[in-house]
Image (cartoon, rainbow, N blue to C red):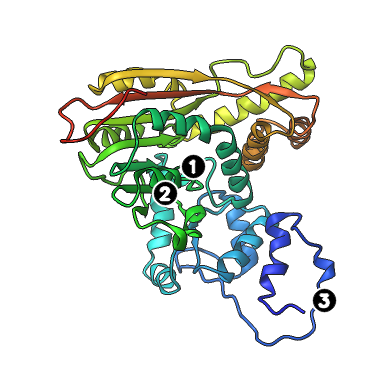
Amino acid sequence: MLYGIPSAFTINPVLLGIPPYDPNDLVPISRTTSVVVVVAVHTGVPVGFLGELARLADAEPGKLLWGAAPGLPRYAFTAFLKRRGLDMPYVPYKDVATPAVDLGEGRVHESHRRDASSGAPTMNSYIFDNSAEAETAERFASLDSLYNFRTFQYLETAGIGPGWHCLEVGGGSGAIAAWMADRVGPSGYVLVTDLDPRFMEGSVDRTPAQMELRRHDIGTDPLPEQAFDLVHARLVLQHVPQRHQAFARLVAALKPRGWLVIEEFDGRLIDRTIPMADASEAERFRKMGRAVGRLLDDRGYEADWPRRLYCHLKTAGLTEVSMEGHVAVREGGDPGTSLDAANYAQVRKEAVAKGMITDAEVDAVLARLDASDFAVFSPVMFTAWGRRPGAAAAGATVTHP
């Protein structure tokens, strides 16, 4: 016999697709309480019932924002959006009262109106927004599996150790920040930031005392200056419209002799198809890549940003600057092609709606990415590092990555 919240079993199949149990094996016996979930909109949003809201969200993908208290309201509305195929960016909240106050005072609506009317790209237009939770979870798991060990090697070579103060920008799953916290120990400090930290908030109770989680937009929000021995950002700045200002903040946040390590994908430097691939399959894969590239460009993407990291670090006055690139073969069904599949699934609706590719072509690409006889090259992962000049604090030791 199981006593619990039924939403966990009725909503999970919608969110997860295939949960780790068969919902048909669960037979309800009795209801002990009833919960009513209310969807409220600001008076400035021209809808009167749920169907009108769905039609408006479908007509303006990515422009309507929504928020909810933690728990059932958030998961119920997430399931509604997923079932209807709607794109509404999520505004995270940690308590029950604040979202209602923000809605009543128009703050959530004003954020939507300001971003939509300005015409300028904002981080709310992030192409791989964390509100697509299933795809984001797959992306984070793949990235951690593929690249964490390489990231750790760079950070270890920089000399990270007890007592260091570190900044992790765009914390994602939180795995890198947790590794940093373990290396710096109780005498150190790790600040991990993210525009949407929902994938780290669930582990707040297990966060070590020396680690702080902060909701933060690196494109617009300030950082403490000369505060960190090590600053790291992976796959972040290339998606920030104000990336040059954000980069300057990261440099300013370094202590004298502190290290800055930046990692970015360059998916346009090489043809990712492998010559042995079927010509039609290879061209479909290229077409999908071109569609993603155009969608990125629409959001203010700077295609040569990754390959120019070395120049940016040198121009900023950092010393001991260097950069490396990494490419690997990704076979169908492995974490690398799973990463591609998660990204393509997340953007397919917009890409198809804009006539960049057809649903059938996306289905064909996704099928091949899961096939054991298919393979592609990874994007080039560039890692660049440099050191702020100046005298290190007494007793500090650093090494070259």
Q: Amino acid at mark 1?
A: Tyr
Q: Where does label 3 land, which residue?
A: 27
Q: Which mark is residue 126?
A: 1
Query: x%, y% of residue 372?
Result: 79, 29
**On screen, residue 172 above or below 396:** below
Total numbered badges shown on the rendered structure = 3
Query: x%, y% of residue 13?
Result: 73, 60
Q: Tag 3 or tag 1, which sits nearer the N-term?
A: 3
Mark 1 vs mark 3, foreground winner is 3
- Inter-mark Cα distance, 1 to 2: 10 Å
Relative horizontal placement of residue 370, taking residue 75 as reference (left or right): right
Q: Rate crowding at label 2 as few (under 14), some (14 to 19) or many (20 or more) other CA atoms within 10 Å.
A: many
Quarter of the image containing the C terminus?
Answer: top left
- Note whether residue 234 is visible: yes
* Badge 1 vs badge 2, beta-carbon distance below 8 Å: yes
Quarter of the image containing the N terminus?
Answer: bottom right
